[in-house]
Image (tube, rainbow, N blue to C red):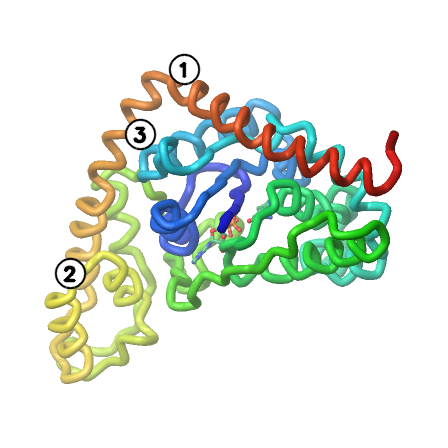
Amino acid sequence: MRVLSGIQPSGALHIGNYFGALKQFIELQHSYDGLYFIANYHALTSLHDPAALRAATLEVAVSFLALGLDPEKATIFVQSDVPEVPELTWMLSCVTPVGLLERCHAYKDKVAQGLPAEHGLFAYPVLMAADILIYDSNLVPVGQDQKQHVEVTRDIALRFNNRYGEVFTIPEALILPEVAVVPGLDGRKMSKSYGNTIEIFDEPEVLRKKVMSVKTDSTPVEAPKNPETCNAFALFRLVAPPEELAEVRRLYLEGGAAYGEVKKRTAELMADYFAEAREKRKELLAHPEQVREVLAAGAARARSLARVTLDRAREACGIW
Ligand code: ADP
Ligand code: TRP
């Protein structure tokens, strides 16, 4: 079974990205042939500063490695290092109905907001389909927000196969559990676009300040509270050991939980949780050539897989 997923390089990764996506990638690498890449072509649809894009690409690669994606187990690479992908994108475009793309939310939302949409944003799901199909991926672990794009990929693959014969493996989305939706400082979903993030690699002091500022209500300490709707608890549960979690849950339900205490403890636990990764990241940043080596090896393997599928697709549709 082959598992593939990508993350756009759009800045430092936050703990929503970790608990919602990366953590699962890291666990899956032990059971599957995993391919994980940095979707820098996708980022071109929204990130227009070349230096920032370059830096963010390296940052995500460093984060992957620091957090425990193991190049001995998984294939880690940068999307643009596999030029077969944009080549396949064109062939897929030629079987993709415009209506299918018009229904995709990233494009639709932008148009609804009255913003000018570029062709890249419109065609984004076709590029994503090429990413997935070119490696004969079976499973695509993604958050709920990307589910539609995997469905579009399936649609495109079926249309191509219908027209030209069995060329592509039909992938399935592995939807990462909703439980893992991490709230941001203001209680909305943690997201770069809301500016409410806690970064994975924040130093303990920064982390503490951010966690202390998490929005909570004004229920008094003694009053019972609902842990399921509390932002502080939602962050606490991500990093708390089981007994401590049970104890704090009890305090919520029976009364006696102080938000300030829960936040303070969350910040401590979170700083510990990522301590090793923070150190690893510093080492890697000091040796970017090692990261580039890993990416080059990953790209070589990815390309060798991509070539086979691309040749099959070219042959099937009559490109010489
Ligand atoms: P952002 O919303 O900050 O731009 P992305 O859309 O780039 O984040 O997310 C990359 C990955 O991280 C996706 O798989 C997404 O589902 C996951 N993810 C992002 N934010 C969260 C969150 N708050 N909770 C859980 N998972 C998240
Ligand atoms: N579009 C995805 C996102 O924004 C990133 C991505 C690009 C991806 N290609 C992919 C994810 C292929 C899974 C499979 O999060």
Quarter of the picture holding the C terminus: top right
Measured Cα–Cα span from mark 2 to mark 1: 37 Å
Secondary structure of the residue carrying tag 2 is: loop
Position in image of residue 282 (x %, y %): 28, 25
Q: Which residue is mark 2?
A: 241
Q: Which residue is mark 1?
A: 289
Q: Is residue 297 above or below residue 96?
A: above
Q: Is the C-beta of the residue carrying label 3 under 8 Å from the nearest atom of ligand 1?
A: no
Q: Residues within 10 Å of mark 2 (few under 14, many from 20)?
A: few
- Amino acid at circle 3: Arg
Looking at marks 3 and 1 on the same chain, the residue that comes earlier in the sequence is marked by 3
Whether residue 197 is visible: no
Q: Residues within 10 Å of mark 1 (few under 14, many from 20)?
A: few
Secondary structure of the residue carrying tag 1 is: helix
- The structure residue drawn at horizontal position 60% and vertical position 41%, both measured from the top left corner, is 135
Q: Is residue 181 left or right of residue 88?
A: left
- The structure residue drawn at horizontal position 78% and vertical position 56%, both measured from the top left corner, is 101
Q: Is residue 316 left or right of residue 69?
A: right
Q: Is the C-beta of the residue carrying label 1 under 8 Å from the nearest atom of ligand 2?
A: no
- The structure residue drawn at horizontal position 20% and vertical position 39%, both measured from the top left corner, is 275
Position in image of residue 51 (x %, y %): 56, 23
- The structure residue drawn at horizontal position 36% and vertical position 38%, both measured from the top left corner, is 69
Q: Is residue 318 left or right of residue 62?
A: right
Looking at marks 3 and 2 on the same chain, the residue that comes earlier in the sequence is marked by 2
Q: Is residue 312 above or below residue 125?
A: above
The answer to which quarter of the image holds residue 179 is bottom left
- Amino acid at circle 1: Glu
Q: Which residue is mark 3?
A: 281
Measured Cα–Cα span from mark 3 to mark 1: 13 Å
- Amino acid at circle 2: Pro
Measured Cα–Cα span from mark 3 to mark 2: 25 Å
Residue closest to the eye, 48 or 303: 303
